[in-house]
Amino acid sequence: MKIRLSIIIPVLNEASVITEALTRLQPLRNQGTEVVVVDGGSTDGSQNLALELASRFVRTSKGRAEQMNAGAKIATGDYLLFLHIDTQLPENADLALAKVFEAGAEWGRFDVRLSGNQPLLRMVETLMNRRSRLTGIATGDQAIFVRRDAFERIGGFSEMPLMEDIALSKQLKHIARPVCLRERVITSSRRWERNGILRTILLMWRLRLLYFLGTDPARLATLYYRP
């Protein structure tokens, strides 16, 4: 089964990594996968670097949820995959997606591996993957994929400054449980290593708890992005 897949990538000031990341996607693009880059107002030249390597490019206001919604709006694929610029898809990701969608999947995500070599990161990624299987909640680092009609049925991402992936998962769970692929994406551990692995674990647990207790996502974003 050959599917019409669109990969949607939100970016903001990612000139240092965008060329390498988009170059890795060119084999998929050459086989018909659409690569949509959505810039949230970069000032470092990211736009110029992306134009030759993307199938489609659009600028929006800053905000990952708004950017991904804008990308979905201009994408032409029947199946959407939302990819962070610092996350690398596994080999033959398109074949894995074609297989699960042909089997009737509505949405899902990949397992994740953090890029660093510290042993504690292995525990972190294992817990992330297991928790996701248990709860049916996916995070953006796991490269969420979804049928376009299901995405449109729930109105896309809620345009909030943080936790938009959690909100999307909760809405999609009303349609179906996610397919949790064993194939792994590799996502950058730069934030974990820069801010301290244990400190980041505690911060993410705190943010998740506060979100489920009803804290304003704008407040959560302030905590998350605080230097």
Image: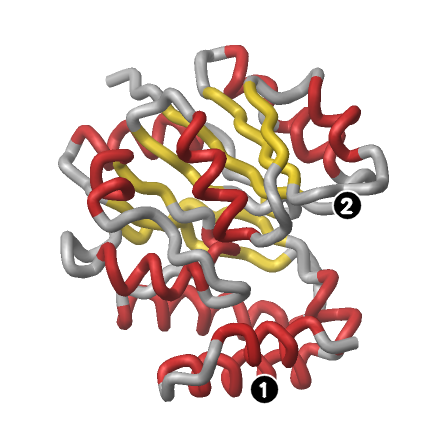
Q: Is residue 24 left or right of residue 126?
A: right
- Note whether 17 is above or below 123 in the view shown: above
Total label count? 2
- Nearest the camera: 192 or 118? 192
Using the rendered view, name the quadrant where residue 40 is placed.
top right
Which residue carries the number 2 mark? 13
Instruction: Inspect the image, locate mark 2, and give the three-letter code of the amino acid beneath it.
Output: Asn
- Circle 1 packing at 10 Å, graded few (<14), some (14-19), many (20+), is few
Q: Quadrant of the C terminus?
A: bottom right
- Nearest the camera: 139 or 217? 217
Q: Quadrant of the N terminus?
A: top left
Disc ID at residue 35 = none
* Image coords of residue 203 (percent x, y): 60, 83
- Circle 2 packing at 10 Å, graded few (<14), some (14-19), many (20+), is some
Using the rendered view, name the quadrant where residue 95 is placed.
top left
Q: Residue at x 49, y 52 (%)?
A: 65
Question: Alpha-carbon distance for marks 2 and 1?
Answer: 27 Å
- Of circles 2 and 1, the one toward us is 2
Q: Residue at x 39, y 57 (%)?
A: 158
Q: Is residue 73 left or right of residue 29?
A: left
Instruction: Inspect the image, locate mark 1, and give the three-letter code of the amino acid beneath it.
Output: Leu
Q: Is residue 129 left or right of residue 90?
A: left
Q: Secondary structure at mark 2?
A: loop
- Note whether 14 is above or below 19 in the view shown: below
Using the rendered view, name the quadrant where residue 122 is placed.
bottom right
* Image coords of residue 142 (percent x, y): 46, 53
* Image coords of residue 27 (percent x, y): 56, 18
Q: Residue at x 34, y 47 (%)?
A: 156
Which residue carries the number 1 mark? 202
* Image coords of residue 214 (percent x, y): 38, 84
Q: Residue at x 67, y 20 (%)?
A: 53
